[in-house]
Image: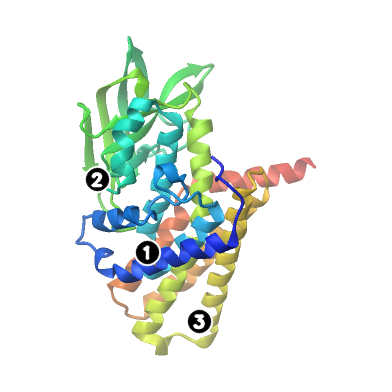
Amino acid sequence: MSASKPENKTQHVTLQHKLSTLLDKHTNLIKTPQGEFPFQLWQTLAEAHLLTPLLSQSLNGQNATYAEVARAAETFAQKTGLPGLTMAWIMQQLLIRIIASSTSESIQTRYLPPLLSGESLCSLCISEPDVGAHPKHLSTEAVRDGDTYLLNGEKTYITNGPHASVFIVLAITHVDAGRKFFSAFIIPRETPGLSTTPLKGFHALQPTAHCQVKLNNCRIPQDYRVGALNDAFESISKPFRELEDILMLCPIAGSVRALIESITRENQTTLSLEDLGQMLAMADTLSSIGMLAAEELDKTSNSELKVSFIITSKLMVEQFNIKIKNYLKNTPFGEVVTALANDIDVLVNIAKYANTAKQKARAARYLQK
């Protein structure tokens, strides 16, 4: 899942500038009523070849590097104040690339055009109720039945699930000595047996919406499988987790800057110069770490630095969240500030188990030296 070419600083600036200019020009398309996704903005981005810049030109992209996309995503988050929308922008690029590289020609012909034009969305279904995304505890199964598969199970915290037209679902296809092996499948929304229900009490990361997906004897053709049989956790789930973790570091920095701007705009007098200076310094540091991490992705190396960048950034944002929560507790602010602060808190807690596992693995490798 490497990007197409090494970073080019001229293109890096150009992508960020193009996206910034488009967002400034179409501010009316960014905010949508509660529960609605800004498809008109998505289509406008697609028309400008800015919806999927990470992809090749044949996929309406710009062959952008990870570093270019990370910097542009930081601008996206800061200008919109919507880290959830920025996350959707990154996720769609990664998911569309999976479909383009790991599915049959018939699947690509049917589902890629509306995704690339911004008319539809794709969602990734891995996590399950009460167990998260831990592979040992996942239970959704796909059982071979002739030239089809029958899928049964339940997925949760599905980003953009209420708006998606197609889902990529991870399911068990083999068990050997207690070890589960997973395959991924394309499941269209209209598949009989597929149903979605709102995720009660979760309203963060708007205008993206989240839901649960239930699969009750969903029958799909065998050529709807994504990638190799029994290899989806290693080839899809783990790489996607790392890419999203790293590419969201710069947007978190942009979100922190947007929050600082909103706080100073609403109630500047209650924020001490010391606190403001600390917040600005942390945003700058997060941005720098995010860029370094994205550049490591472009090197296509297995550098341990990538893990260190993720761990350090999450710890920094956790400390920032503690400071912000204490500050907001004693100072009245409007909905924009409280929603943005909550979004940042939610982002840093995504895949918490996976990040804890990274920390433990890092320590274990150190002790083995």
| Foreground label between 3 and 2 | 2
Kindly identify which residue carries mark 3: 276
Of the 4 image quadrants, the one containing the N terminus is: top right
Kindly identify which residue carries mark 1: 342
Up the image or down, 191 lies above or below 175; here it is below
Type of residue at label 2?
Answer: Pro
Q: Earlier in the sequence, mark 2 or mark 1?
A: 2
Within 10 Å of the Cα at label 3, are there few (<14), some (14-19), or many (20+) other Cα atoms?
Answer: some
Disc 3 element: helix
Checking the image for residue 162, the label placed there is: 2
Q: How far apart are marks 3 and 2 (CA)?
A: 38 Å
Instruction: Say whether residue 238 is visible.
Output: yes
Instruction: Say whether residue 203 is visible.
Output: no
Q: In this view, does 233 lie to the left or right of 168?
A: right
Q: Which residue lies furthest to the right in this view?
A: 369
Type of residue at label 3?
Answer: Leu
Q: Which residue lies furthest to the bottom in this view?
A: 269
Up the image or down, 212 lies above or below 279; here it is above
Count of marks placed on residues: 3
Disc 1 element: helix
Type of residue at label 1?
Answer: Asn
Q: Where residue 314 sits: x, y (%)? A: 54, 58
Front in this rendered view, residue 38 or 312: 38
Of the 4 image quadrants, the one containing the C terminus is: top right
Q: Where residue 44 sits: x, y (%)? A: 29, 57
Q: In this view, does 237 lie to the left or right of 360?
A: left
Q: Is residue 219 left or right of residue 63?
A: left
Disc 2 element: loop
